[in-house]
Image (tube, rainbow, N blue to C red):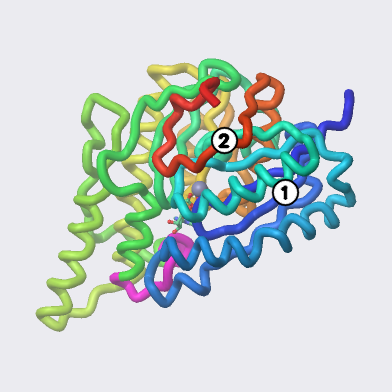
Amino acid sequence: MNRNLILAFETSCDETSVAVIENGDKILSNIVATQIKSHQRFGGVVPEVASRHHIEQITGCIDDALTKANVSYDDLTAVAVTYGPGLVGALLIGVTAAKAVAWAHNLPLIPVNHIAGHIYGARLVKPIEFPAMALVVSGGHTELVYMKEENSFEIIGETRDDAAGEAYDKVGRVLSINYPAGKEVDELAHKGNDTFNFPRAMDQDDNFDFSFSGLKSAFINTVHHADQIHESLSREDLAASFQQSVVDVLADKTVRALHEYPVKQLILAGGVAANRGIRERLTDELAKFSNTELVLVPLSLCGDNAAMIGAAGEMLYRHSISSDATLNADPSLDFDWIGEA
Ligand code: KG4
Ligand code: ZN
C-alpha cells in the first residue's frame, strides 16, 4: 500500500491544531495549541479572541506538525480542513491556511465536517465497522448519528436546546468552576450522590431527541434559592445529581436507538466523551449487546484536534471528495455537505 499522508487542520473553536496522519489511521503528529487560558476570564469562548489566537498559532503549528512527523510538504498526499460547523472567524483561519498550502504545493484540498471528524476519530483506535452509530456529545453538539455505510450520516436525534457540554459549562459557572467546566464537574460528581433528583427531560419520549436547558435551569434555581436562604448545598451532590441526569438521558436514548438500529459499533465522540460517568454507563449498557461493540477514543482525542480531521479527510479522499480554492467556512454546516463540495 502506498504511503498516504494527510496534513490536517482544525480551528473551529478554541484549539489551533495541525496533524499529519498516515493512511487514515496512524498519527504521525497532532499539535494542539489551546487558547483556554485566554477565554477563561470571560467565562466562555470569545470569537474575536479565538480568531486572533488562531492567526498567531497556525504557522507554528504547521511547522511543528511537519517536523514532529518528520515529513516535508513534498511527501504529502492531500490537505484536509474543518470548514464547519463552528465559529466563522475561527474556521476561516484554518480554511485559509489549508487553501494556501494546497495551492502552493499543488495538493488536493479536502473539506471536512467537524462532527464527521469527531466520529471518524474512532478510526485512530480501530477500524470503523458499518453499520455504526455515534453518540456525539460536545460543547456545541448532542447528536445520535446513524451510519449505514462509510461516508453516510443520518442524524436520528439531536438536542432541541443546549448541547450537553454547554450545560456542563453553564452549571460549572454557577459552582464557580472555570470554563470549560466539564472535567471538573465530572470529578466532583464522583465524590457525591444523586440527592437532588433533577429532571430527565424527554427521557421517555418516543424519539431520540434531547433537551438539557430544563435541567440547567433546575440546577441554577436550586443553587440560587439556597443562596437566598443562606443554606449551603453539597457541591459534590449537586454535581453528581446533574451528571446522573445527563448520563441517564444520554444512555437511555442511545440504548433505545441501538434496539431500533442494530449496529456493529457504537462510537462515543466529542469533548463530553471524556466524561467518566457516560463512559462507565455505556460500558455497562453495551455489555448487554452481544453484537455491538463500544468504541471509546482516548481522552487525548476526545476534545478538538486535527488528527480526527485527518482520519475523516483520508476517508473523503478515497471517496474522491475535494474542493477548489473557492472553499468557504460554513458556520452552520450540516451533514448535507457530503458529495456537494
Ligand atoms: O468537542 P469539544 O472539545 O469542543 C466542541 O466542539 O464543542 O468539547 C468541549 C466540551 C466542553 O463543553 C467541556 O466542558 C466538555 O466538552 N468536557 C466534558 C468533559 N471534558 C470536556 N464534559 C463532561 N465531562 C468531561 N470529563
Ligand atoms: Zn468538537
Residue closer to the observer: 333 or 273: 333
Label 1 CB less than 8 angstroms from ligand 2: no
Residue at point 72%, 52% (across, down): 30
**Where's the N terminus, which quadrant?**
top right
Vertical placement of residue 194 versus 273, above or below? below
Question: For the residues carrying marks 2 and 1, which lies nearer the camera in this image?
Answer: 2
Q: Which mark is residue 252?
A: none
Could you classify mark 2 by the number of other residues whose Cα lies within 10 Å: few (under 14), some (14-19), or many (20 or more)? few
The x and y percentages for residue 319 are 66, 19
In this view, the residue farthest toward the bottom is 230
Could you classify mark 1 by the number of other residues whose Cα lies within 10 Å: few (under 14), some (14-19), or many (20 or more)? many
- Kind of residue indicated by mark 1: Ala
Residue at point 69%, 26% (across, down): 317
Residue closer to the observer: 216 or 59: 59
**Part of the protein shown in magenta:** 174-187
Q: Tell me where residue 102 sits by quadrant.
A: top right
Earlier-in-chain disc, 2 versus 1: 1
In the picture, measured across the screen, residue 236 lies left or right of residue 26, that is: left
Badge 2 is on which residue?
A: 326
Residue at point 51%, 55% (across, down): 90
Residue closer to the observer: 153 or 281: 153
Badge 1 is on which residue?
A: 19
In the picture, measured across the screen, residue 81 lies left or right of residue 25, that is: left
The x and y percentages for residue 277 are 45, 51
Vertical placement of residue 272 versus 340, above or below? below
